[in-house]
Image: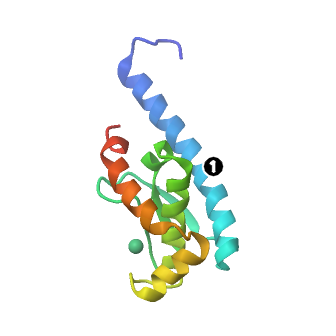
Amino acid sequence: MPNHDDQAAVARKVLQWYKKQALVDFARRLALFSTKLGVAMPTLILSSARTRWGSCNSRKEVRLNWRLLQAPPHLINYVICHELAHLKQMNHSAKFWAEVASIYPDYKAAEKELKAWSPKLHVM
Ligand SMILES: [Zn+2]
């Protein structure tokens, strides 16, 4: 960057970098786990939601928060597996959790860990 003293410009660049990396990283994980689960690769959309890490809809779009890129890799995997399982079960029923467990067995620990990480990940 030409001017490192321009804090707003640096912040914009960092944000851009995170979003670009997040798209590449999340797409790779989505491809891997959608194959494992036996669902078609969904459309990936980045979100900046303040309250959630991921969501999905019946149009087969998965939204993932770019801030998640700062989390440990296994937690990124967990959120991705959770959203992919929703493509099969649009609810949080026992059937849904069975789908999650089929590709991410230790999901209960991950869910807890993600809650603990959340405040740190939302700083930026
Ligand atoms: Zn859910």
- Give above or below for 106 relative to 94: above
Of the pair 91 and 112, the residue shown nearer to us: 112
Splitting the image into four quadrants, where does ligand 1 fall? bottom left
Quadrant assignment, res 99: bottom right
Task: Answer whether residue 51 is visible to the viewer in this image.
Answer: yes
Residue type indicated by callout 1: Val
Q: Position of residue 107 (x, y in %)?
A: 48, 67
Of the pair 112 and 6, the residue shown nearer to us: 112
Colour setting: rainbow
Q: Is mark 1 within 8 Å of ligand 1?
A: no
Residue at (61%, 50%) from the top-left corner?
A: 25
Residue at (34%, 56%) from the top-left corner?
A: 115
Left or right: 30 with respect to 69?
Answer: right
Residue at (34%, 41%) from the top-left corner?
A: 120
Left or right: 41 with respect to 51?
Answer: right
Left or right: 36 with respect to 104?
Answer: right
Residue at (54%, 68%) from the top-left corner?
A: 81
Q: Position of residue 76 (x, y in %)?
A: 52, 55
Number of marks in the rendered image: 1
Residue that numbered label 1 is attached to: 24
- Give above or below for 27 relative to 103: above
Left or right: 86 with respect to 121?
Answer: right
Q: Secondary structure at mark 1?
A: helix
Q: Position of residue 92 (x, y in %)?
A: 38, 81
Q: Position of residue 67 (x, y in %)?
A: 43, 46
**Image quadrant for the C terminus?**
top left
Task: Answer whether residue 54 is visible to the viewer in this image.
Answer: no
